Protein backbone atom coordinates (compact mmCIF):
# COMPACT_ATOMS: atom_id res chain seq x y z
CA UNK A 1 0.00 0.00 0.00
CA UNK A 2 1.38 3.37 -0.88
CA UNK A 3 0.42 6.86 0.14
CA UNK A 4 1.79 9.42 -2.27
CA UNK A 5 0.51 12.62 -0.80
CA UNK A 6 -1.94 13.76 1.80
CA UNK A 7 -3.27 17.23 1.34
CA UNK A 8 -3.33 19.07 4.62
CA UNK A 9 -5.61 22.04 4.84
CA UNK A 10 -4.36 24.57 7.37
CA UNK A 11 -6.58 25.50 10.26
CA UNK A 12 -8.52 22.24 10.04
CA UNK A 13 -7.97 19.43 12.46
CA UNK A 14 -7.19 16.17 10.77
CA UNK A 15 -7.80 12.76 12.15
CA UNK A 16 -7.18 9.58 10.23
CA UNK A 17 -8.96 6.48 11.39
CA UNK A 18 -7.24 3.86 9.29
CA UNK A 19 -5.87 0.53 10.28
CA UNK A 20 -2.84 -0.46 8.31
CA UNK A 21 -1.46 -3.90 9.18
CA UNK A 22 2.14 -3.21 8.29
CA UNK A 23 2.95 0.41 8.54
CA UNK A 24 6.24 1.49 7.13
CA UNK A 25 8.33 4.04 8.98
CA UNK A 26 7.56 6.76 6.46
CA UNK A 27 3.83 6.21 6.74
CA UNK A 28 4.07 6.17 10.53
CA UNK A 29 5.82 9.53 10.43
CA UNK A 30 3.18 10.83 8.05
CA UNK A 31 0.33 9.62 10.25
CA UNK A 32 1.95 11.07 13.35
CA UNK A 33 2.35 14.31 11.49
CA UNK A 34 -1.29 14.41 10.44
CA UNK A 35 -2.56 13.49 13.90
CA UNK A 36 -0.49 15.92 15.85
CA UNK A 37 -0.65 18.85 13.54
CA UNK A 38 -1.08 21.90 15.62
CA UNK A 39 -4.04 24.19 15.24
CA UNK A 40 -2.64 27.65 14.88
CA UNK A 41 -5.66 29.52 13.57
CA UNK A 42 -9.15 29.34 14.97
CA UNK A 43 -12.47 31.04 14.38
CA UNK A 44 -14.27 31.67 17.64
CA UNK A 45 -17.81 32.84 18.19
CA UNK A 46 -18.12 34.24 21.69
CA UNK A 47 -21.25 35.44 23.46
CA UNK A 48 -21.48 37.06 26.84
CA UNK A 49 -24.16 35.77 29.17
CA UNK A 50 -27.53 37.54 29.13
CA UNK A 51 -28.39 39.68 32.11
CA UNK A 52 -30.96 38.23 34.47
CA UNK A 53 -34.45 39.78 34.66
CA UNK A 54 -35.35 42.23 37.33
CA UNK A 55 -38.11 41.20 39.69
CA UNK A 56 -41.42 42.93 40.09
CA UNK A 57 -42.76 42.34 43.56
CA UNK A 58 -44.54 44.31 46.28
CA UNK A 59 -44.19 44.01 49.96
CA UNK A 60 -47.61 44.50 51.52
CA UNK A 61 -48.54 44.83 55.12
CA UNK A 62 -51.54 45.80 57.22
CA UNK A 63 -50.32 49.38 57.20
CA UNK A 64 -49.47 49.43 53.53
CA UNK A 65 -52.17 47.63 51.56
CA UNK A 66 -51.03 48.96 48.18
CA UNK A 67 -47.61 47.56 48.95
CA UNK A 68 -44.22 49.03 48.25
CA UNK A 69 -41.96 47.68 45.50
CA UNK A 70 -39.25 45.28 46.69
CA UNK A 71 -38.16 43.48 43.46
CA UNK A 72 -34.38 43.20 43.11
CA UNK A 73 -32.32 43.75 39.98
CA UNK A 74 -31.22 40.91 37.73
CA UNK A 75 -27.58 39.83 37.86
CA UNK A 76 -25.06 40.68 35.17
CA UNK A 77 -24.20 37.99 32.62
CA UNK A 78 -20.72 36.46 32.57
CA UNK A 79 -17.98 37.59 30.19
CA UNK A 80 -16.05 35.46 27.72
CA UNK A 81 -12.41 35.97 28.58
CA UNK A 82 -9.33 34.79 26.75
CA UNK A 83 -6.45 34.09 29.09
CA UNK A 84 -2.90 33.78 27.91
CA UNK A 85 -1.26 30.63 29.20
CA UNK A 86 2.08 29.02 28.50
CA UNK A 87 0.51 25.66 29.35
CA UNK A 88 -1.26 25.50 25.99
CA UNK A 89 0.44 25.44 22.63
CA UNK A 90 -2.31 25.81 20.13
CA UNK A 91 -6.07 26.16 19.73
CA UNK A 92 -6.88 22.46 19.40
CA UNK A 93 -8.71 22.34 22.73
CA UNK A 94 -10.99 25.27 21.96
CA UNK A 95 -14.72 25.05 21.21
CA UNK A 96 -15.92 27.15 18.25
CA UNK A 97 -18.92 28.57 20.14
CA UNK A 98 -18.52 29.81 23.67
CA UNK A 99 -21.34 31.31 25.68
CA UNK A 100 -20.87 32.64 29.19
CA UNK A 101 -23.46 31.95 31.87
CA UNK A 102 -26.61 34.08 32.25
CA UNK A 103 -27.08 36.33 35.23
CA UNK A 104 -29.55 35.18 37.87
CA UNK A 105 -33.01 36.79 38.10
CA UNK A 106 -33.74 39.32 40.80
CA UNK A 107 -36.08 38.27 43.58
CA UNK A 108 -38.40 39.82 46.13
CA UNK A 109 -37.03 41.37 49.29
CA UNK A 110 -34.77 43.39 47.02
CA UNK A 111 -32.54 40.43 46.26
CA UNK A 112 -30.17 40.95 43.37
CA UNK A 113 -29.62 38.09 40.92
CA UNK A 114 -26.28 36.30 40.93
CA UNK A 115 -23.65 37.34 38.43
CA UNK A 116 -23.27 34.87 35.57
CA UNK A 117 -20.06 32.91 35.64
CA UNK A 118 -17.34 34.03 33.23
CA UNK A 119 -16.08 31.60 30.61
CA UNK A 120 -12.30 31.66 30.69
CA UNK A 121 -10.64 30.22 27.63
CA UNK A 122 -6.94 29.52 27.71
CA UNK A 123 -5.01 30.50 24.62
CA UNK A 124 -1.28 30.21 23.92
CA UNK A 125 1.27 32.94 24.39
CA UNK A 126 1.54 34.89 21.15
CA UNK A 127 -2.15 34.83 20.25
CA UNK A 128 -3.19 37.59 17.89
CA UNK A 129 -6.86 38.53 17.67
CA UNK A 130 -8.55 39.63 14.45
CA UNK A 131 -12.07 40.92 14.83
CA UNK A 132 -14.70 39.97 12.28
CA UNK A 133 -17.79 41.04 14.18
CA UNK A 134 -18.42 42.64 17.55
CA UNK A 135 -16.89 45.22 19.83
CA UNK A 136 -13.20 45.78 20.33
CA UNK A 137 -12.11 43.50 23.15
CA UNK A 138 -10.98 45.06 26.41
CA UNK A 139 -7.89 44.02 28.29
CA UNK A 140 -7.89 42.93 31.90
CA UNK A 141 -4.38 43.35 33.23
CA UNK A 142 -3.76 40.21 35.17
CA UNK A 143 -0.28 39.33 34.20
CA UNK A 144 3.16 39.21 35.66
CA UNK A 145 4.87 42.54 36.06
CA UNK A 146 8.17 40.78 35.40
CA UNK A 147 9.42 41.02 31.85
CA UNK A 148 8.61 37.48 30.89
CA UNK A 149 10.06 35.05 28.54
CA UNK A 150 6.79 33.93 26.97
CA UNK A 151 7.96 30.33 27.00
CA UNK A 152 8.85 30.15 30.63
CA UNK A 153 7.89 26.79 32.04
CA UNK A 154 4.24 26.86 33.13
CA UNK A 155 3.80 27.35 36.83
CA UNK A 156 7.11 29.07 37.38
CA UNK A 157 5.75 32.53 36.82
CA UNK A 158 4.86 34.92 39.58
CA UNK A 159 1.57 36.49 38.70
CA UNK A 160 0.21 39.72 39.97
CA UNK A 161 -3.45 39.13 40.67
CA UNK A 162 -4.43 42.79 40.74
CA UNK A 163 -7.30 43.03 38.30
CA UNK A 164 -7.09 46.28 36.52
CA UNK A 165 -9.43 47.04 33.67
CA UNK A 166 -7.98 49.08 30.92
CA UNK A 167 -9.54 50.20 27.73
CA UNK A 168 -7.91 48.35 24.91
CA UNK A 169 -7.99 51.32 22.62
CA UNK A 170 -5.73 53.19 25.06
CA UNK A 171 -3.62 50.25 26.10
CA UNK A 172 -2.87 48.76 22.72
CA UNK A 173 -1.81 51.25 20.14
CA UNK A 174 -4.03 50.86 17.12
CA UNK A 175 -2.16 48.68 14.71
CA UNK A 176 -1.84 48.96 11.04
CA UNK A 177 -4.67 46.84 9.74
CA UNK A 178 -2.52 44.35 7.96
CA UNK A 179 0.81 44.81 9.68
CA UNK A 180 2.51 41.62 10.69
CA UNK A 181 0.09 39.50 8.74
CA UNK A 182 1.37 37.40 5.98
CA UNK A 183 -0.36 37.73 2.67
CA UNK A 184 -1.31 34.09 3.04
CA UNK A 185 -2.88 34.74 6.43
CA UNK A 186 -4.78 37.68 5.01
CA UNK A 187 -6.04 35.65 2.11
CA UNK A 188 -7.17 32.85 4.38
CA UNK A 189 -8.87 35.19 6.79
CA UNK A 190 -10.63 36.94 3.95
CA UNK A 191 -11.75 33.58 2.61
CA UNK A 192 -13.02 32.55 6.02
CA UNK A 193 -14.84 35.83 6.35
CA UNK A 194 -16.55 35.64 3.00
CA UNK A 195 -17.72 32.13 3.82
CA UNK A 196 -19.66 33.76 6.62
CA UNK A 197 -22.47 35.33 4.61
CA UNK A 198 -23.10 38.20 6.96
CA UNK A 199 -19.50 39.41 6.91
CA UNK A 200 -17.73 41.36 4.25
CA UNK A 201 -13.94 41.31 3.93
CA UNK A 202 -13.68 45.01 4.72
CA UNK A 203 -15.27 44.38 8.09
CA UNK A 204 -12.27 42.48 9.42
CA UNK A 205 -10.16 44.44 11.83
CA UNK A 206 -6.75 42.81 11.83
CA UNK A 207 -4.56 42.54 14.92
CA UNK A 208 -6.91 44.27 17.33
CA UNK A 209 -5.05 42.78 20.26
CA UNK A 210 -2.20 40.47 21.14
CA UNK A 211 -1.74 38.26 24.15
CA UNK A 212 1.94 38.04 24.86
CA UNK A 213 2.25 37.58 28.62
CA UNK A 214 1.41 34.70 30.88
CA UNK A 215 -1.84 35.44 32.73
CA UNK A 216 -2.88 38.33 30.49
CA UNK A 217 -6.63 38.41 29.98
CA UNK A 218 -8.87 39.97 27.45
CA UNK A 219 -12.66 40.16 27.36
CA UNK A 220 -13.96 39.34 23.90
CA UNK A 221 -17.66 39.33 24.77
CA UNK A 222 -19.25 41.16 27.66
CA UNK A 223 -22.08 39.91 29.78
CA UNK A 224 -25.33 41.90 29.53
CA UNK A 225 -26.50 44.07 32.39
CA UNK A 226 -29.24 42.67 34.58
CA UNK A 227 -32.76 44.10 34.26
CA UNK A 228 -34.09 46.48 36.87
CA UNK A 229 -36.21 45.25 39.68
CA UNK A 230 -39.26 47.37 40.42
CA UNK A 231 -37.48 49.02 43.36
CA UNK A 232 -34.99 50.63 41.04
CA UNK A 233 -37.31 51.15 38.08
CA UNK A 234 -39.98 52.80 40.22
CA UNK A 235 -37.45 55.13 41.78
CA UNK A 236 -35.97 55.97 38.41
CA UNK A 237 -39.35 56.59 36.77
CA UNK A 238 -40.48 58.75 39.62
CA UNK A 239 -37.38 60.85 39.36
CA UNK A 240 -37.68 61.08 35.59
CA UNK A 241 -41.35 62.06 35.70
CA UNK A 242 -40.89 64.64 38.41
CA UNK A 243 -38.03 66.18 36.45
CA UNK A 244 -40.08 66.35 33.24
CA UNK A 245 -41.54 69.85 32.74
CA UNK A 246 -45.32 69.96 32.50
CA UNK A 247 -45.95 66.85 34.56
CA UNK A 248 -47.85 67.54 37.70
CA UNK A 249 -47.38 65.57 40.85
CA UNK A 250 -50.90 64.28 40.39
CA UNK A 251 -49.71 62.20 37.42
CA UNK A 252 -47.02 60.53 39.45
CA UNK A 253 -46.27 56.88 38.75
CA UNK A 254 -48.65 54.25 39.95
CA UNK A 255 -46.57 51.24 40.95
CA UNK A 256 -49.42 48.81 40.37
CA UNK A 257 -49.82 49.65 36.71
CA UNK A 258 -46.34 49.52 35.33
CA UNK A 259 -46.09 50.91 31.81
CA UNK A 260 -44.14 49.48 28.85
CA UNK A 261 -40.96 51.29 29.85
CA UNK A 262 -40.82 49.47 33.13
CA UNK A 263 -41.32 46.07 31.61
CA UNK A 264 -38.59 46.82 29.09
CA UNK A 265 -36.31 47.86 31.94
CA UNK A 266 -36.98 44.69 33.87
CA UNK A 267 -35.69 42.28 31.22
CA UNK A 268 -31.93 41.71 31.21
CA UNK A 269 -29.74 43.00 28.41
CA UNK A 270 -28.44 40.26 26.07
CA UNK A 271 -24.69 39.62 26.24
CA UNK A 272 -22.53 41.07 23.49
CA UNK A 273 -21.43 38.80 20.67
CA UNK A 274 -18.10 38.68 18.89
CA UNK A 275 -16.72 36.69 16.02
CA UNK A 276 -12.94 36.62 16.17
CA UNK A 277 -10.13 34.79 14.46
CA UNK A 278 -7.32 33.78 16.76
CA UNK A 279 -3.95 33.36 15.18
CA UNK A 280 -0.87 32.02 16.85
CA UNK A 281 2.41 33.68 16.23
CA UNK A 282 5.38 32.74 18.31
CA UNK A 283 7.85 35.22 19.59
CA UNK A 284 11.54 34.47 19.98
CA UNK A 285 14.76 36.35 19.56
CA UNK A 286 16.30 33.76 17.30
CA UNK A 287 14.63 31.34 14.94
CA UNK A 288 16.50 28.23 13.80
CA UNK A 289 15.59 27.65 10.20
CA UNK A 290 16.77 24.57 8.37
CA UNK A 291 15.89 21.51 6.35
CA UNK A 292 14.66 18.42 8.19
CA UNK A 293 17.48 16.50 9.87
CA UNK A 294 19.92 19.43 9.77
CA UNK A 295 20.39 19.12 13.52
CA UNK A 296 18.34 22.09 14.75
CA UNK A 297 16.90 20.31 17.76
CA UNK A 298 20.29 18.88 18.70
CA UNK A 299 21.72 22.37 18.46
CA UNK A 300 18.95 23.83 20.60
CA UNK A 301 19.75 21.23 23.27
CA UNK A 302 23.44 22.12 23.01
CA UNK A 303 23.06 25.87 23.46
CA UNK A 304 20.21 25.86 26.00
CA UNK A 305 18.77 23.60 28.64
CA UNK A 306 15.87 22.66 26.38
CA UNK A 307 15.41 18.95 25.74
CA UNK A 308 13.76 18.72 22.33
CA UNK A 309 13.18 15.36 20.68
CA UNK A 310 16.01 14.36 18.35
CA UNK A 311 15.57 11.66 15.73
CA UNK A 312 17.45 10.34 12.75
CA UNK A 313 14.34 10.71 10.59
CA UNK A 314 12.93 13.88 9.08
CA UNK A 315 10.22 15.90 10.86
CA UNK A 316 11.03 14.79 14.38
CA UNK A 317 10.10 18.30 15.41
CA UNK A 318 6.37 18.80 14.98
CA UNK A 319 5.95 22.03 16.88
CA UNK A 320 8.36 24.83 17.66
CA UNK A 321 10.66 24.04 20.58
CA UNK A 322 11.93 26.87 22.65
CA UNK A 323 15.04 27.29 24.68
CA UNK A 324 16.63 30.04 26.66
CA UNK A 325 20.30 30.78 26.11
CA UNK A 326 21.67 32.34 29.25
CA UNK A 327 24.54 34.76 29.46
CA UNK A 328 25.77 36.34 32.70
CA UNK A 329 23.70 39.47 32.31
CA UNK A 330 21.36 38.58 29.52
CA UNK A 331 19.35 35.82 27.97
CA UNK A 332 17.88 35.18 24.55
CA UNK A 333 15.07 32.89 23.46
CA UNK A 334 15.65 30.54 20.62
CA UNK A 335 12.92 28.76 18.66
CA UNK A 336 13.67 25.53 16.86
CA UNK A 337 11.20 25.66 14.02
CA UNK A 338 10.18 22.39 12.36
CA UNK A 339 12.12 21.55 9.23
CA UNK A 340 11.28 23.35 6.01
CA UNK A 341 11.51 21.75 2.62
CA UNK A 342 11.26 23.11 -0.88
CA UNK A 343 7.60 23.89 -1.49
CA UNK A 344 6.82 24.52 2.18
CA UNK A 345 5.04 27.74 1.19
CA UNK A 346 2.68 25.57 -0.88
CA UNK A 347 2.07 23.50 2.22
CA UNK A 348 4.50 20.70 1.44
CA UNK A 349 6.09 18.96 4.38
CA UNK A 350 4.84 20.65 7.50
CA UNK A 351 3.87 23.51 5.27
CA UNK A 352 3.35 27.13 6.04
CA UNK A 353 1.93 26.53 9.50
CA UNK A 354 5.41 27.04 10.85
CA UNK A 355 6.62 29.63 8.40
CA UNK A 356 4.29 31.89 10.33
CA UNK A 357 6.34 31.45 13.50
CA UNK A 358 9.37 32.83 11.74
CA UNK A 359 7.54 36.11 11.23
CA UNK A 360 7.97 36.94 14.87
CA UNK A 361 11.56 35.98 15.43
CA UNK A 362 13.97 38.89 15.46
CA UNK A 363 16.96 37.21 13.88
CA UNK A 364 17.47 34.05 11.85
CA UNK A 365 20.04 31.29 12.26
CA UNK A 366 20.08 29.13 9.14
CA UNK A 367 21.16 25.65 10.19
CA UNK A 368 22.64 23.61 7.34
CA UNK A 369 23.87 20.04 7.24
CA UNK A 370 27.41 19.97 5.86
CA UNK A 371 27.20 16.22 5.34
CA UNK A 372 23.84 16.11 3.56
CA UNK A 373 25.40 15.43 0.15
CA UNK A 374 28.47 13.57 1.43
CA UNK A 375 29.25 9.90 1.83
CA UNK A 376 26.42 8.72 -0.40
CA UNK A 377 23.76 10.87 1.35
CA UNK A 378 21.07 12.08 -1.00
CA UNK A 379 20.61 15.55 0.45
CA UNK A 380 21.50 18.94 -0.96
CA UNK A 381 24.85 20.65 -0.52
CA UNK A 382 24.61 23.39 2.16
CA UNK A 383 24.58 26.34 -0.27
CA UNK A 384 21.59 24.83 -2.07
CA UNK A 385 19.89 24.21 1.27
CA UNK A 386 20.43 27.89 2.06
CA UNK A 387 19.04 29.10 -1.25
CA UNK A 388 15.92 26.93 -0.90
CA UNK A 389 15.36 28.15 2.65
CA UNK A 390 15.65 31.82 1.71
CA UNK A 391 13.32 31.34 -1.26
CA UNK A 392 10.76 29.49 0.86
CA UNK A 393 10.69 32.35 3.35
CA UNK A 394 10.34 34.90 0.60
CA UNK A 395 7.60 32.93 -1.15
CA UNK A 396 5.66 32.75 2.08
CA UNK A 397 5.97 36.44 2.78
CA UNK A 398 8.01 38.95 0.89
CA UNK A 399 10.72 40.38 3.14
CA UNK A 400 10.53 37.52 5.65
CA UNK A 401 14.20 36.72 5.14
CA UNK A 402 15.11 40.39 5.44
CA UNK A 403 16.36 40.30 9.01
CA UNK A 404 19.74 39.84 10.67
CA UNK A 405 21.05 36.35 10.03
CA UNK A 406 23.95 33.97 10.44
CA UNK A 407 24.66 30.50 9.15
CA UNK A 408 25.35 27.48 11.35
CA UNK A 409 27.35 24.88 9.44
CA UNK A 410 26.46 21.77 11.43
CA UNK A 411 27.94 18.26 11.44
CA UNK A 412 31.50 19.49 10.97
CA UNK A 413 32.61 16.21 12.59
CA UNK A 414 31.53 14.16 9.57
CA UNK A 415 34.18 12.95 7.12
CA UNK A 416 34.73 15.50 4.36
CA UNK A 417 32.69 18.19 6.12
CA UNK A 418 35.71 20.47 6.63
CA UNK A 419 36.16 20.84 2.86
CA UNK A 420 32.46 21.50 2.35
CA UNK A 421 32.63 24.15 5.08
CA UNK A 422 35.52 25.90 3.30
CA UNK A 423 33.58 25.84 0.05
CA UNK A 424 30.44 27.14 1.78
CA UNK A 425 32.34 30.13 3.16
CA UNK A 426 33.39 31.00 -0.37
CA UNK A 427 29.86 30.69 -1.73
CA UNK A 428 28.00 32.70 0.88
CA UNK A 429 28.53 36.43 1.24
CA UNK A 430 27.35 38.98 3.78
CA UNK A 431 26.70 36.76 6.81
CA UNK A 432 29.06 34.93 9.19
CA UNK A 433 29.26 31.14 8.98
CA UNK A 434 29.87 29.21 12.23
CA UNK A 435 31.22 25.66 12.02
CA UNK A 436 29.54 23.55 14.68
CA UNK A 437 29.24 19.98 15.82
CA UNK A 438 26.00 20.09 17.77
CA UNK A 439 26.30 16.53 19.11
CA UNK A 440 29.70 17.17 20.68
CA UNK A 441 28.89 20.81 21.42
CA UNK A 442 31.93 21.95 19.47
CA UNK A 443 31.83 25.53 18.21
CA UNK A 444 28.80 26.19 20.42
CA UNK A 445 30.41 28.89 22.67
CA UNK A 446 31.49 30.86 19.57
CA UNK A 447 28.00 30.50 18.10
CA UNK A 448 26.42 31.79 21.33
CA UNK A 449 28.62 34.90 21.16
CA UNK A 450 27.64 35.36 17.51
CA UNK A 451 23.92 35.05 18.31
CA UNK A 452 24.20 37.51 21.14
CA UNK A 453 25.97 40.05 18.94
CA UNK A 454 23.29 39.64 16.30
CA UNK A 455 20.40 40.07 18.75
CA UNK A 456 22.16 42.96 20.53
CA UNK A 457 23.31 44.99 17.63
CA UNK A 458 20.78 44.01 14.98
CA UNK A 459 23.51 44.62 12.46
CA UNK A 460 22.38 44.51 8.90
CA UNK A 461 23.80 41.07 8.10
CA UNK A 462 21.10 39.75 5.83
CA UNK A 463 21.15 36.61 3.74
CA UNK A 464 19.68 37.09 0.32
CA UNK A 465 19.47 34.52 -2.47
CA UNK A 466 21.77 36.75 -4.58
CA UNK A 467 24.47 36.32 -1.92
CA UNK A 468 24.46 32.55 -2.32
CA UNK A 469 26.47 31.13 -5.20
CA UNK A 470 24.94 27.82 -6.31
CA UNK A 471 26.59 27.65 -9.75
N1 LIG B 1 27.32 13.64 13.02
C1 LIG B 1 26.49 14.55 13.53
N2 LIG B 1 25.19 14.26 13.61
C2 LIG B 1 24.36 15.21 14.12
C3 LIG B 1 24.83 16.47 14.55
N3 LIG B 1 23.79 17.20 14.99
C4 LIG B 1 22.69 16.43 14.85
N4 LIG B 1 23.04 15.23 14.33
C5 LIG B 1 22.14 14.11 14.02
O1 LIG B 1 21.24 14.50 12.98
C6 LIG B 1 19.98 13.86 13.16
C7 LIG B 1 18.87 14.90 13.12
O2 LIG B 1 19.00 15.74 14.24
P1 LIG B 1 17.80 16.66 14.76
O3 LIG B 1 18.38 17.54 15.80
O4 LIG B 1 16.60 15.87 15.10
O5 LIG B 1 17.50 17.47 13.42
P2 LIG B 1 16.34 18.54 13.15
O6 LIG B 1 16.91 19.55 12.22
O7 LIG B 1 15.79 19.06 14.41
O8 LIG B 1 15.30 17.64 12.39
P3 LIG B 1 13.74 17.91 12.15
O9 LIG B 1 13.05 17.64 13.42
O10 LIG B 1 13.40 16.93 11.08
O11 LIG B 1 13.56 19.32 11.68
C8 LIG B 1 20.06 13.12 14.48
O12 LIG B 1 20.33 11.77 14.22
C9 LIG B 1 21.23 13.76 15.19
O13 LIG B 1 21.89 12.89 16.08
C10 LIG B 1 26.24 16.73 14.46
O14 LIG B 1 26.77 17.77 14.81
N5 LIG B 1 27.01 15.73 13.93
Image (tube, grey):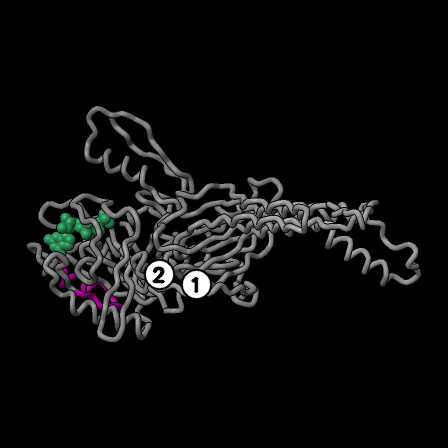
Up-down relation of residue 377 to residue 163 (above or below)? above
Quadrant holding the N terminus: top left
Residue displayed at 90% across by 63% down: 245
On the image, the x and y values in percent for residue 166 come to 54, 65
Q: Are marks 2 and 1 in contact (CB under 8 Å)?
A: no
Residue displayed at 34% across by 50% down: 354
Tell me the quarter of the picture where residue 438 sits: bottom left
Residue position for label 1: 161
Q: How many marks?
A: 2
Quick one: label 1, few (<14), some, or many (20+) residues within 10 Å?
A: few
User: Upstream in the sequence, badge 2 or badge 1?
Assistant: 2
Whether residue 467 appears in magenta in the rendering, the answer is no
Residue farthest front in this picture: 62
Residue position for label 2: 150
Q: What element does badge 1 sit on? A: loop
* Mark 1 sits near ligand 1, with its Cβ under 8 Å away: no
Choose between 468 and 1: the one closer to the eye: 1
Choose between 128 and 385: the one closer to the eye: 128
Choose between 442 and 4: the one closer to the eye: 442
In magenta, the rendered stretch is 420-434
Amino acid sequence: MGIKAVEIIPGIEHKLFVKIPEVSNDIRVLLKLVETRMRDRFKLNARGGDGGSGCSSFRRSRHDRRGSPDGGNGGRGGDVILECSSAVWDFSSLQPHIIAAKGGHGASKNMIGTRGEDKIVQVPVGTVIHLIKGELPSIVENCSTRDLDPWDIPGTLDTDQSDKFVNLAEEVAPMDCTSGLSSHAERTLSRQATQDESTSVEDIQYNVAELTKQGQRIIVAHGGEGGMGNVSSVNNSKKARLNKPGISRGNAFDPETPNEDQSALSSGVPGSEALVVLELKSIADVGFVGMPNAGKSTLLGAISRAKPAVGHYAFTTLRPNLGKVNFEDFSITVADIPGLIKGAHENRGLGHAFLRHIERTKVLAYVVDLAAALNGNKGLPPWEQLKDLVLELEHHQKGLSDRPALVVANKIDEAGAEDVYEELKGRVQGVPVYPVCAVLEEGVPELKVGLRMLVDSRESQRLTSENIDCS
